Image: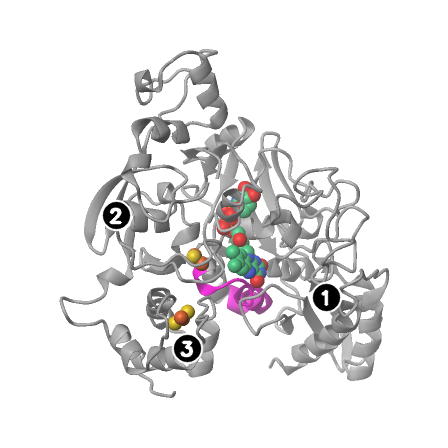
Amino acid sequence: MIPFRLQKVRTEVDAIAAARAGGRYIAGGTTLVDLMREEVERPERLVDINALPLGGIRTEDDQLVIGALARMSEVAAHPDTLRLQPLIAEALIEGASPQLRNVASIGGNLLQRARCPYLRMLDAPCNKRVPGSGCAAIGGVNVGHAILGASAHCAATHPSDLAVALVALDATVRVRGPAGERSFPVELLFRLPEATPHLEHTLQPAELIIEVRVPHDASARHARYLKVRDRSSYEFALVSVAAALHVEKGVIRTARIAAGGVGTRPWRMRASEQALVGRAPDRASFEEAAQRSLDGARPLSGNGYKAELLPRTMVRALEMTREVV
Amino acid sequence: MKQPDTFDPGRHDAHSETATLLSRREFFRITSGALSMAAVPAGLAQTADGAAIDAVLPAHVQLTINGQTRSVDIDPRQSVLDVLREVLGLTGTKKGCNQGACGACTVLIDGKRVLSCLALAAMHDGASITTIEGLAQNDRLHPLQAAFVDHEAFQCGYCTPGQIMSGIGCIAEGHARSVDDIRFWMSGNICRCGAYPGIAAAVAEAAGRKEA
Ligand SMILES: Cc1cc2nc3c(=O)[nH]c(=O)nc-3n(C[C@H](O)[C@H](O)[C@H](O)COP(=O)(O)OP(=O)(O)OC[C@H]3O[C@@H](n4cnc5c(N)ncnc54)[C@H](O)[C@@H]3O)c2cc1C
Ligand code: FES
Ligand code: FES
């Protein structure tokens, strides 16, 4: 770890000023401390934001509002989350471990970095770590990499489970920075790698995530998160699917689907959603919709299995939404 | 920075300590500005171009460890794990991966189970920490420690302190309702010897439900 200075801030104004002066926000530190120790991240100033009043979970009408500093475990167990958005609780609990979830924040979760092994190998090329150095994964070990949204420069997936659920639910993120405040869909927080994989999100310099807002929707109670991985818990997704269905009189009115582990960002499955609306919620409709999940998929040398696993996971996740009573 | 396995006071002289607490660039600016490090008082340091440096000389934290309050001077890079093991000599808490992946370093901070390898000590001023050393009351083992012995819930024992601290958290959270529940909620603790059946049974017993 390179030497750094740690500054504790008590107000958002101070936090933003410190970040403008070159500081890097730190919340739970579960991504940042790890990558600093590996010297993948080399901030010279850290801005400890834990004393800011950005914790907590509340509701506004039927909208769930989650503070950026709320901890994963706290959000997953909160009665409002369980009542309004059980999908979020399920996605959170399927991620990381209890010890990590006790400290990992919601803002940090969204901004966690890729789990591509080459990102951490300082002697391997990696366009995320050293722009222009190349991508070792595309011609190397890429079993865990993306089949959707990759470029010739990077194929790393976004590892957050929470983000997959939030993208399916049309959640928005509220941020504050030197130029004031703005809100936008969580889906637009993440960039495609294209020619600039080192730019992972759309926050402006010094912008601070304030909260995440999840609108209510008739499908919210019939929503499930299915995560397929190499062991049954405490592992990142090979493929995951968040699915929510609103069914009325035997017909699907609304479908919300997003997938993790397959895209360079959490991947909303709009073609699959459209294929479901107006159909009966049965196996045949689910299978047809799931085939649409592969529109534009381009497997690499080692991850072709994801093109089979993704539609199967989606069918099963859609079936699971029907098992919720 | 590679952490030495044991704390070596000889390596911790004032000069290297000061150096590590300033950013590398500032260190070079100061030294090239012909200021001897010994002449830079805490809080009053100036870089060669005259800009003031905040007071960063040894980050000072107060930690209550197993009920005892300790004041320690630390390098901001030190994790709670390294402070426990290398500064305070509490080596019961183990370092496995040092990456948040194995659970060997689990301690309770303010009552919650967390990974001490990813917790910067400088961010935990005022925290209350419970480690494996703080569980037994004189010669009486904590019930979960006793259950680990009864169920032979270990082989080499390296993961055990982390398993026990995590098990205490797991029970307190109400996540020890069945062996399946325990297996899921204890999955942040890896045991390379594969003592999982004994670990799950010990946690179940200590939780007051002998389903194993
Ligand atoms: C072994 C292991 C397994 C894991 N498994 C999973 C998993 O299965 N699923 C999953 O989803 N995650 C997983 N994680 C990742 C974990 O969830 C994240 O590390 C965590 O959520 C990050 O939150 P944090 O508060 O610790 O972030 P930090 O490390 O403090 O920060 C991460 C990044 O976010 C920035 N940041 C933090 N807060 C804000 C804010 N409010 N505004 C602007 N920027 C901010 C920081 O500057 C930094 O760049 C795993 C982590 C580990 C170590
Ligand atoms: S040493 Fe902390 S999790 Fe492995
Ligand atoms: S007892 Fe050896 S690692 Fe668990």
Magenta stretch contains residue A95: yes
Q: Main secondary structure of the magenta part?
A: helix
Which residue bears the numbered disc 1? A257
Vertical placement of residue B94 versus B147, above or below? above
Secondary structure under tag 2 reads: loop
Report the Cα–Cα distance between label 2 and label 3: 30 Å
Give the letter of the chain under mark 1.
A
- The magenta stretch is A81-99
Q: Are labels 2 and 1 on one chain?
A: no
Foreground pick, A36 / B10: B10
Secondary structure under tag 1 reads: strand
The residue drawn where x is 25% and y is 48% is B88
Structural crowding at the residue carrying mark 2, measured as other residues with C-alpha within 10 Å and reported as few (<14), some (14–19) or many (≥20): few
Position in image of residue A310 (x %, y %): 75, 70
Report the Cα–Cα distance between label 2 and label 1: 51 Å
Magenta stretch contains residue A161: no
The circle drawn on residue A148 is none
Vertical placement of residue A323 versus B138, above or below? below
Q: Is residue A168 left or right of residue A291?
A: left
The residue drawn where x is 50% and y is 64% is A76
Whether disc 3's CB lies below 8 Å from ligand 3 is answered yes
Kind of residue indicated by mark 3: Ala
Which residue bears the numbered disc 2? B88
Position in image of residue B25 (x %, y %): 50, 23
Give the letter of the chain under mark 2.
B
Kind of residue indicated by mark 1: Ile
Report the Cα–Cα distance between label 3 and label 1: 39 Å
Kind of residue indicated by mark 2: Leu
Which residue bears the numbered disc 3? B195
Mark 2–mark 3 contact, CB under 8 Å?
no
Which tag, 2 or 3, sits closer to the chain's start?
2
